[in-house]
Image: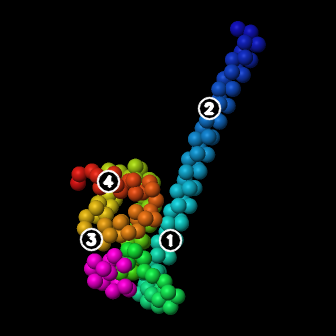
Amino acid sequence: MNWEAIGAVGQMLGSIAVFITLGYLAVQVRHARQTGQRALSQGRSQALRSLLTQQADERMIRLALKTNAALGGQSTPFVRALMDETWVTEDEAMLVMWTQITLWNYFLQIIPHVVELPPMERRQFDVPLRSYGRPGPFRLFYQHYIRQLGHPDAIRYIENLLAQPN
């Protein structure tokens, strides 16, 4: 074998190494982007849950009801339905609503990544979601809030879950 042949083999191996390196970098960049998106989504979700928890404070609810009434606003469909069907007061219904919204925000954080959960954790995650199909405040919230304003992929996940036998 002469030096030209050895040089050609070396160039070919060098080219293959470059392509492998570029492929590895592409995978790493994609992974870093996904990790960044997940961290951003989680941070946004945690901040929103914190804000929603503040909204569930009884003083905030009373203030919201007072300002809403003064400005001629109306209760949300969920609050009206909860008041009509259970005879709770408007501030009690709002407390239930803010609690449900906070829980729904948690579900929205997990649903896009639910396939990554181990089977036991996924089953634990799915159990409260099945409540959206049973009589009670969860189903009322699902009908009057989630189905109206919810994320289509999340709704599809819940609908598929409810269609499965327990």
Select label 4 or label 2 by which is in front. 4
The reply to whether callout 2 and callout 1 are in contact (CB within 8 Å) is no
Q: Is residue 89 highlighted in magenta?
A: yes
Q: Secondary structure at mark 2?
A: helix
Q: Position of residue 137 (x, y in %)?
A: 30, 72
Distance Cα–Cα, label 2 vs label 1? 42 Å
Taking the view exactly as shown, the residue that stands out farthest to the left is: 166
Q: Is residue 22 highlighted in magenta?
A: no
> Tag 1: residue type?
Leu
Distance Cα–Cα, label 2 vs label 3? 56 Å
Q: Which residue is mark 1?
A: 48
Select label 2 or label 3 by which is in front. 3
Q: Which residue is mark 2?
A: 20
Q: Is residue 99 above or below residue 19?
A: below
Q: Say whether disc 4 or disc 1 marks the residue closer to the N-terminus.
A: 1
Q: Residues within 10 Å of mark 2 (few under 14, many from 20)?
A: few
Q: Which residue is mark 3?
A: 136
Q: Residues within 10 Å of mark 1 (few under 14, many from 20)?
A: some
Distance Cα–Cα, label 4 vs label 3? 18 Å
Q: Quadrant of the N terminus?
A: top right
> Tag 2: residue type?
Ile
Q: Say whether disc 2 or disc 1 marks the residue closer to the N-terminus.
A: 2
Residue at left 50%, top 76%?
A: 51
Select label 2 or label 1 by which is in front. 1
Q: Nearer the viewer, residue 48 or 137?
A: 137
Residue at left 40%, top 57%?
A: 155
Distance Cα–Cα, label 4 vs label 2? 42 Å
Q: Which residues are magenta?
A: 80-92
Q: Which residue is mark 4?
A: 161
